[in-house]
Image: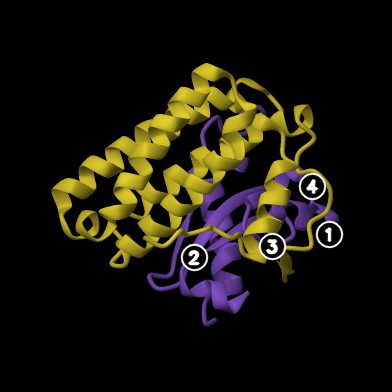
Chain colours: A purple, B yellow
Amino acid sequence: MLEELDDYVKLAVDIEQGVAAGGGALHADCEAALLANGSKQENVWGADWIPQVREVRYESFINIRPRQNNPAMTILDPALRARVEAVVRNLFEGV
Amino acid sequence: MTNQIAIESDEIQARRHRFMNLALPVRLGELAESLAFATVTSDHPKYPKFLTRTLNESVNLIDWTVAAVDPEVQIELAELRSHLTDWLRDAQAIGGDPVKRARVVAALREWSQKILDRSGLADYDDWQMEFDYPPGIRAAAEVLV
């Protein structure tokens, strides 16, 4: 997956297990990989990692969760964003 | 004049195959996401590169979706595709001109919301359940621990 880090990488992040799936061209690929790994869908959120500026972005349609009070593509809850960011930085900082 | 035939790479072909397995509303959601990503990265120093990648991605997603939507939405997608190809041709200039960039970002944001509205995903409490998403297990992504 490292070659893809030249640009940005799509991720699905499990905030409970502290794992992420990346390297898929679609967020669906990443989410499916996590679910196959035992993640619960309610704990999985979409993000992108942009290595050049070491930033996490939170826009993904998989984040549309009216049932979980997130009716938008971006993650609206700052605390939830922070948890996603922590997992991503833990996995990618230093790569 | 040389005739040019566009040939999909294996990677794009595989991606198209996976994309086509998604329910139509989910495909529209992917398109809305792709357009949105081009707006949230607009302050990036390599924005022309991001813009080119996301616009190319969006054009592909439109091409893979347009046949399945209602005629009314087909017209909208055709209009959007036309804008995207214009912006692709002009990506370097858009990246280097804050006024142009702001105009394109605003248009992309509007289109993203419009396509998301068309998808109807936000109208469902649990659209993942409704559309059996994601469909099956994909080997294209890897789990990072």
Q: Quadrant of residue B94?
A: bottom left
Q: Residue at x 58, y 78 (%)?
A: A2
Q: Chain of mark 2?
A: A
Q: What x and y, as percent, mark residue B110?
A: 36, 31
Q: Could you say which is closer to the camera, residue A68 or residue B50?
A: B50
Q: What x and y, as percent, mark residue B11?
A: 65, 64
Mark 4 lies on residue: A40
Q: Nearer the viewer, mark 3 or mark 4?
A: 3
Q: Nearer the viewer, mark 2 or mark 1?
A: 2
Circle 1: element type: loop
The quadrant of the image that shows the C terminus of chain B is bottom right
In 3D space, how far apart are the residues under numbered discs 1 and 4 (Cα atoms)?
Answer: 9 Å
Q: Are marks 3 and 1 in contact (CB under 8 Å)?
A: yes
Q: Are marks 3 and 4 in contact (CB under 8 Å)?
A: no
Mark 2 lies on residue: A8
Q: Residue at x 71, y 54 (%)?
A: A29
Q: Callout 1: 10 Å neighbours few (<14), some, many (20+)?
A: some
Residue B40 against residue B32 in the figure, above or below: below
Q: Chain of mark 3?
A: A
**Res B74 seen here:** yes
Q: Nearer the viewer, mark 2 or mark 3?
A: 2
Dot 3 amino acid type: Ala
Dot 4 amino acid type: Lys
Q: Please report whichever mark, 3 or 4, sits nearer to the chain's N-terminal start.
A: 3
Circle 3: element type: strand
Q: Could you say which is closer to the camera, residue B137 or residue B19?
A: B19
Q: Residue at x 43, y 35 (%)?
A: B112
Q: Chain of mark 4?
A: A
Mark 1 lies on residue: A37
